[in-house]
Amino acid sequence: MELVENGSLRGSKIADIDFDDAVRHHDLPDAGGITDYRQAFKDAKADLARMFARQKVLTIYRALVTDISELDTDRTGIAWAWEAEGALRGSDIGKTDTSGLLLEGRVATTQVNWHLTIAMNAFDPEEREIVLVRGASVTLISVHNAQGYRVGAEITPPALRGIIIRA
């Protein structure tokens, strides 16, 4: 399933990704009218299709409030981002200047829930969110210390580099 081949995002027909369905699954922000959200949803579909049109694998990031010794590689969560700053913005690390980890990984675009990804980017584009299917396989590239919006030194233990972690 090609990202924009025949109007689809890796198996999800763009036209079938429905605004009303997204509204049922997400709280709408307070600002703006429903017409604005419909346009944002339409724009997010077009933007994501354009950005990821030829990619089969994405580099993604996940910020976690945890220590490297407590990192659970079997349950890292489904909410990642395509930029490090987006991952930090969407986490308690970015919101409260808390310390934690920033994971960098790679995932096949077939492991992305494009319906929820589009919805999340329509309603909160600053997080640059990539929503994975539960249990998706992510190849871990690196682990960094993080605090606030600052990414610190890489601290990837050799035993974790290149392993498959689960969303």
Image (spheres, rainbow, N blue to C red):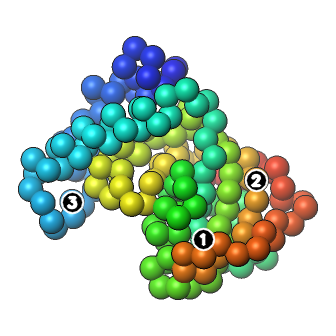
What's the CA distance linking mark 3 and mark 2?
A: 34 Å
Q: Are marks 3 and 2 in contact (CB under 8 Å)?
A: no
> Regarding mark 2 in the picture, which secondary structure is present there?
strand
Which residue is the site of mark 1?
64
Residue 93 horizontal side relative to residue 144, left or right: left
Is residue 65 visible from the viewing direction of this image? no
Q: Position of residue 64 (x, y in %)?
A: 60, 71
- The mark found on residue 153 in the picture is none
Query: Which residue of the protein is positioned furthest toward the right in this rendering?
Result: 158
- Which comes before the other along the chain, label 2 or label 1? 1
> Regarding mark 1 in the picture, which secondary structure is present there?
strand
Residue type at mark 1: give it: Leu
The 10 Å Cα crowd at callout 2, few under 14, some 14 to 19, many 20 or more, is some
Identify the residue at horizontal 54%, vertical 51% (top origin): 82
Query: Which residue of the protein is positioned furthest toward the top in this rendering?
Result: 6
What's the CA distance linking mark 3 and mark 1?
A: 25 Å
Asked if residue 85 is positioned above or below residue 117 in the image, the reply reads below
Residue 119 horizontal side relative to residue 133, left or right: left
> Regarding mark 3 in the picture, which secondary structure is present there?
loop
Which residue is the site of mark 3?
28
Residue type at mark 3: give it: Leu
Q: Position of residue 77 (x, y in %)?
A: 56, 59
Q: Front-most of 76 and 122?
A: 122
Asked if residue 1 is positioned above or below residue 66 in the image, the reply reads above
Q: Position of residue 15 (x, y in %)?
A: 27, 26
- The mark found on residue 141 in the picture is 2
Residue type at mark 2: give it: Ile
Asked if residue 131 is positioned above or below residue 155 in the image, the reply reads above
- Which comes before the other along the chain, label 3 or label 2? 3
